[in-house]
Amino acid sequence: MALPKHKTLAQRKGREADIRRIFRTNLRNRRMELGLTQAGLHEHLSQSWVQQLEAPAGNEVPSLYQLELIAQSLKCLASDLLVEGRFASDINPDDDLRAYRGRRR
């Protein structure tokens, strides 16, 4: 399967922004599914780095090695973090983690 060719730099940058958004959403949803705070990932990752990765305006992009470390920490495949809706959640991005834990079964 061939990758689509983006005709303009703007189209490519737009797609890159989409991928970063998908990654941020999946990272946050998976972390919350596991009941982890950002600080809870510090065993493998820097807490401040996780905050940067999850920031809505963030342009932080992990290397492939870092992506693998993140996936191992979240007990998933690296590719799972790049598939839109892979970790669909009823979590509102503005919700506090403590509020989410109260809704868990």
Image (cartoon, rainbow, N blue to C red):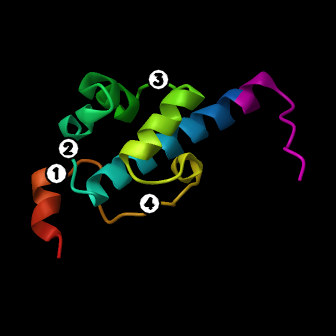
Spatial CA distance of label 2 from label 1 is 7 Å
Crowding at mark 1 (Cα within 10 Å: few <14, some 14-19, many 20+): some
Q: Dividing the image into 4 quarters, which one contains the C terminus?
A: bottom left
- Whether residue 103 sits left or right of residue 75 in the image: it is left
Residues at discs 4 and 1 in contact (Cβ within 8 Å) = no
Q: Which mark is residue 37?
A: 2
Spatial CA distance of label 4 from label 1 is 16 Å
**Disc 4 marks which amino acid?**
Phe
Spatial CA distance of label 4 from label 2 is 16 Å
- The residue tagged 1 is 97
x, y percent for residue 95 = 20, 52
**Disc 2 marks which amino acid?**
Thr
**Mark toward the start of the polypeptide (4 vs 1):** 4
Numbered range of the magenta stretch:
1-12
Please identify the quarter of the rendering in which residue 44 is found. top left
**Mark toward the start of the polypeptide (2 vs 1):** 2
- The residue tagged 3 is 60
Q: Which mark is residue 87?
A: 4
Residue in the picture at 51% in, 60% down? 85
**Disc 3 marks which amino acid?**
Glu
x, y percent for residue 56 = 38, 34
Spatial CA distance of label 4 from label 3 is 20 Å
- Frontmost residue, 26 versus 75: 75
What secondary structure is found at the residue carrying circle 2?
loop
Crowding at mark 3 (Cα within 10 Å: few <14, some 14-19, many 20+): some
What secondary structure is found at the residue carrying circle 1?
helix
Residues at discs 2 and 1 in contact (Cβ within 8 Å) = yes
